[in-house]
Every structure is written in C-alpha cells, then in structure tokens.
C-alpha cells in the first residue's frame, strides 16, 4: 500500500532490497510529479490534449524517448476510484472530497464523460468519438453517498459503483478491511504470522502496521479462497479488529436505490471479494452468478457490469471470463492500466486507478498519459500468453488495488 496513491502493491517485499527498491520508486514518483507539475503549470499539457484522440506514444527499441504516431479510432478511459472521504476503513484509501470535486470539474470541462453502458456500446461501433471517460467506484463504501454522489449530481457525471453482495446483505466491511483494522488495533508491537514462510512483523508505527496488513492481504490473494477464509478466521481469533472501525462503512439498499433513481448505475463485485482466479467452479457460480442476482433483486433492474476484485492479471482467469460471458454480463473491469479502444476485450476492460494525490497537475497528467500511451497489440484479454501476462504483472507490481 502506498498512501499517496491509495494502491495496494501486487507483491510485498522486505529487507534491504525492498528499501532500495522503495527508495528508487519514491524517486521515480517524485520525478513524475515534477514533470507533471511542469507540464500542467506551463500550459504544455493543455497544448498536448488535442493529440490525445489522434495520436499515441509508442516505445522505440534502443531509445528512452517514445515516438508519437497517428492513431485511427476512438479511445475510452475508465477512472477507478474506491472511496471518497478520509475517515475509517478503507484504511488504504483516503481521497479528500474537495480533491474529488476538483477532478470531476476537470474531466467535465476537458473530456466527454459517458455512462459505462454507453461506453461499452461505443467500443463496438465504428463511429469516431472524442476521447471519452467513464467514472467507476469499487466496493461500495458508504461515504460515496455523502461525498461523491452530490458532486456527481452537481456536474451531471454518470458513474458506476461496483457492489459486494455480502456487504449489501450484512452491512459488514470486506475481509481485507478487517485485516487492516486488526493490524491497526493489535495491542502488540511484534506479530508472528504464518505465510508462505513465517513472518515476524514489527508494528512500530501506523505506517508499519499498514505495510504489514498490505503484505498479508497480498499473500492471501495468492492462495485458494477456501484456505484464505480459514486463515482469516484463525487470524481474527488472535488479532481481532475493533468493530467500531468497521461498522456503518458500507452502502445500504436505501442509499443505493436513491442513487440508482438519480442515474448512478451499479455493477457486481462478487459476493465476498475473493481473487476470482483462486475459485473453483462452484465458488465461481456463487461469487459471480449469485452476486448478480442479489443486486438485481435489490435494485429491481438488470446488473450487466462486473469488476474483478483486485483486478490484476493474476486475479482474473479465463474460467471467470467464460462464466461472465454466459451469465449475462456485458463487461468486466480490471485494474490493468491503460485506455480501451476497438478490439479491447469487454471482459478485460482496463482502468486508471486514481490515488490520493491532492495535486491537480498529477491527476491531469495521469489521465492524459493514459489516453496517449499506446496499448499492447494483444488487448488485456485471454489471448494474452502466460509470458505476456507475467510481463504485465511485473510492470504493474506495486500498483495493485482492491
Ligand atoms: Zn474491490
């Protein structure tokens, strides 16, 4: 987890190597911020914006500088948020409401913003359109109603919120939030945990506790989900979270229906937020099929869109994709970064994760870069070879999300 970008690392590292790599990552982040700020405040970013729809940046072998080439077609970007607000879980994400409002004002002014369903239709059409954005939120935290909904109404921005079925049924926060809350509340300064290899975490500061939680959640994403559930139960018997950190954090039906009536659309995000690549066939039916039915019953409307929990290539699977295809879903969103265009697999839509940065320059630069950067020839779909997926995982290591 990196507080500044609200993201959970795909792989957690430790020791001297990790320190060196995190120092190098900090330097790259800082360098990116300086570049973003310079381009934004000098006006160069605005000058480059007309190129977003007509050109793309490609890498050139043997050169550190990218090449600009013509692009024919339309580009579609999907913004991925988690929560808007700063109190309580999710502890890994804190986006100030005023920053969110500035971002919505910015995209409304500079881009075409459409509902996700319209974007899905336009992806299949030949008709050229200007660079287009859609706005999505994962997990269904309650502060979306308080902070995001009024802003979406104010600027007339359509949005899709992906809900977790069991959270809607019980009001409970998801399992990974319980891990973060348990680590936050643990009344010890060292904690031994059985993972792939035994680990001993030093919980000397809030940041160290968050890092430990992050590493544990990353590990739990890699094991079969039935084993993960047992692990979590055993863990909570040793280190219990405070219920006060977890209560009243998720959206309920009343708030969901109010937003739905006002044009917000809803998609499924499984029943219990597992990494779907770790599910067997019966669990796939339960997580993907049942969550759709639960939401459709609650909304009294079709639910056609899905977001993979965590959403990196290793968290998705051809079996899940195939199940989604025959279960009446029209789209499935990942957290693989990039824009979408004709030929993108609708069951592996790419999204741009928006972190906690308060700098508008950083937001504007990241959106622009997402639209300008050329995508791989093979879209992020099942046609990717294992080696391509491995490359993507490595490239995205450190930028995972929930
Ligand atoms: Zn999620």
Image (spheres, rainbow, N blue to C red):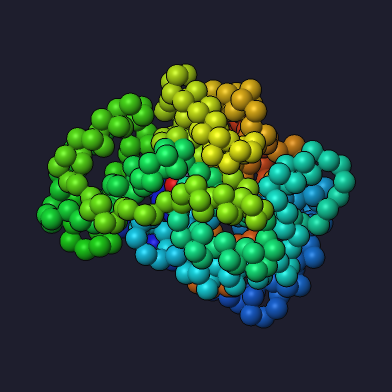
Question: In this rendering, would 41 be left or right of 110?
Answer: left
Q: Is residue 288 above or below residue 202?
A: above
Q: Is residue 84 above or below residue 293?
A: below
Residue lying at the far top of the rendered structure: 281
Q: Residue at x 51, y 65 (%)?
A: 147
Residue lying at the far right of the rendered structure: 127
Q: Give the image location of residue 34, x and y in percent.
A: 54, 73
Q: Quadrant of the N terminus?
A: bottom left
Can residue 211 be seen in this snapshot?
Answer: no
325, 258: nearer the viewer: 258
The quadrant where residue 44 appears: bottom right
Q: Residue at x 47, y 69 (%)?
A: 96
Question: In this rendering, would 134 be left or right of 293?
Answer: right
160, 320: nearer the viewer: 160
Q: Give the image location of residue 165, x and y in percent.
A: 46, 38
The quadrant where residue 175 appears: top left
Can residue 381 be seen in this snapshot?
Answer: yes
Q: Residue at x 30, y 32 (%)?
A: 229
Residue lying at the far bottom of the rendered structure: 42
Q: Give the image location of residue 247, x and y in percent.
A: 32, 53
Q: Is residue 124 above or below residue 138?
A: above
Q: Residue at x 22, y 53 (%)?
A: 242
Q: Give the image location of residue 182, x and y in percent.
A: 23, 50
224, 104: nearer the viewer: 104
402, 301: nearer the viewer: 301
The quadrant where residue 117 appears: top right
Question: In this rendering, would 109 be left or right of 286?
Answer: right
């Amino acid at each position: 987890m990196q507080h500044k970008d609200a993201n959970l690392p795909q792989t957690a590292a430790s020791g001297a190597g990790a320190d060196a790599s995190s120092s190098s990552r900090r330097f790259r982040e800082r360098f990116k911020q300086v570049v973003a700020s310079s381009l934004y405040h000098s006006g160069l970013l605005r000058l480059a914006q007309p190129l977003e729809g007509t050109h793309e940046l490609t890498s050139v072998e043997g050169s550190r500088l990218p090449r600009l080439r013509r692009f024919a077609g339309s580009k579609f970007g999907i913004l991925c948020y988690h929560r808007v607000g700063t109190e309580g879980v999710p502890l890994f994400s804190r986006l100030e409401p005023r920053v969110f409002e500035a971002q919505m004002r910015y995209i409304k002014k500079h881009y075409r913003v459409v509902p996700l369903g319209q974007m899905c239709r336009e992806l299949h059409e030949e008709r050229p359109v200007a660079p287009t954005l859609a706005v999505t939120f994962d997990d269904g935290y309650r502060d979306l109603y308080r902070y995001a909904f009024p802003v979406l109404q104010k600027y007339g921005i359509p949005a899709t919120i992906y809900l977790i079925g069991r959270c809607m049924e019980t009001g409970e926060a998801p399992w990974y939030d319980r891990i973060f809350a348990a680590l936050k509340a643990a009344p010890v300064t060292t904690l031994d945990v059985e993972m792939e290899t035994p680990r001993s975490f030093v919980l000397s500061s809030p940041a160290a506790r968050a890092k430990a939680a992050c590493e544990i959640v990353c590990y739990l994403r890699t094991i079969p989900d039935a084993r993960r559930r047992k692990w979590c139960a055993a863990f909570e018997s040793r280190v219990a979270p405070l219920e006060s950190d977890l209560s009243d954090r998720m959206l309920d039906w009343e708030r969901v229906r109010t937003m739905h009536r006002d044009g917000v659309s809803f998609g499924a995000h499984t029943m219990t937020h597992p990494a779907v690549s770790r599910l067997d066939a019966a669990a796939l039916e339960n997580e993907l099929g049942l969550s759709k039915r639960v939401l459709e019953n609650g909304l009294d409307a079709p639910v056609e869109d899905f977001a993979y929990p965590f959403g990196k290539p290793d968290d998705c699977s051809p079996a899940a994709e195939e199940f989604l295809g025959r279960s009446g879903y029209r789209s499935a969103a990942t957290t693989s970064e990039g824009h979408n265009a004709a030929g993108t697999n609708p069951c592996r839509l790419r999204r741009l994760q928006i972190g906690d940065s308060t700098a508008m320059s950083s937001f504007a630069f990241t959106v622009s870069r997402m639209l300008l950067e050329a995508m791989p020839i093979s879209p992020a779909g099942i046609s990717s070879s294992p080696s391509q997926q491995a490359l993507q995982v490595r490239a995205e290591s450190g930028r995972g999300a929930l």
